[in-house]
Image (cartoon, grey):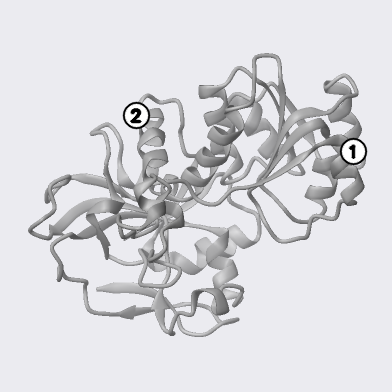
Amino acid sequence: MKAIQVVGYHEKPRQAEVPAPEVTGPFDVVVKIGGAGVCRTDLHILEGQWAEKSGVTLPYTIGHENAGWVHAAGGAVTNVAVGDKVIVHPLMTCGLCRACRSGDDVHCEQSQFPGIDTAGGYAEYLKTSARSVVKIDDSLEPADVAALADAGLTAYHAAAKAARTLRPGHRCVVIGAGGLGHIGIQVLKAITAADLIVVDRNPDAVKLATAIGADHGVVAGGDHVDEVLELTGGHGAETVLDFVGEGGATRDGVAMLRRAGDYHVVGYGENIDVPTIDIISTEINFIGNLVGSYNDLCELMVLAARGLVKLHTTKYPLEEFQAALDDLDAGRIRGRAILVP
């Protein structure tokens, strides 16, 4: 089968012919890929940022946002059948450790992460497990929802955590209305009554944010922090969701946060530099957010099937993987890029 592989760090990936995966265990599921999301993490992988953490041996196939159709399944698989449309949770988990038994499978002690530390979905087929596949509604197409498997799932996980404390009339600042942020905005509008203020340096992204539900859009420039403070009566927002996490976003985001507020870190790339006395004296909270659980993905698919969360996508044939990566790196993608075999 065709697959796009990392052959060296700080090098462009290459298309290769590799053996198609086969069912070897009773809970294995092989998915025929209908869409594979192109994520900024893929750029970080190519830059070598994940080399030590993943411990993967090159070459290997990347791609961790995947959806398609069940192509083959092991004899013990009962939740899906050949031909079913599915979206793939990005982790393969054991189901036996304490985290899995608590429903917190993203922290599974024996997980594998296709596209990060084992073969991913920039290919025609992907091997995963029965615990990782979610059957999707007939109204949804794999290429349209593939990026919800990670970008959408991460955004949903953060938004759902924030929603636990957001009340009607509260203000929530969303920093970044790109691939993750535009999903987070829709999720927040679907599950909270908070007033949403979206900040992005790209005017087109701000326009998209207001079109999909943001109550206020602020173009990041020299005075965007002051604009947000004015919108919040000078107090700051009860919650900040930072989907950027670099380029000074955390400094500005903390300045937009009110006393006893929650700062959700989703994007990454820089350090948070806050004097500890300021954290103590204002009782602000910093909350990390990784990818969501299997149950989170099921809930997100309900919102997608109801039309409450829609991905804005640009689709590329699998062979045009480099164009997709280049467009993402250059900031030319509004929403998510999707590779379609």
Horizontal and vertical percent position of residue 116? 45, 69
Establish if 313 lies above or below 37: above
Mark 2 → mark 1, Cα distance in angstroms: 44 Å
| Label placed on residue 60 | none
Amino acid at pointer 1: Ser
In contact (CB < 8 Å): disc 2 and disc 1: no
Query: Which of disc 1 and disc 2 is earlier in sequence?
Result: 1
- Label 1, on which residue? 281
> Residue at (43%, 44%) from the top-left corner?
148
Residue projecting furthest to the top:
168
| Residue type at numbered disc 2 | Ala
Q: Which quarter of the image is occupied by the N terminus?
A: bottom left
Report the residue at 41% width, 28% height from top: 303
Identified at 87% across, 24% down, the residue is 235
Q: Decide if residue 123 is on the left or right side of residue 22.
A: right
Question: Quick one: label 2, few (<14), some, or many (20+) residues within 10 Å?
Answer: some
Q: What residue does disc 2 label?
A: 305
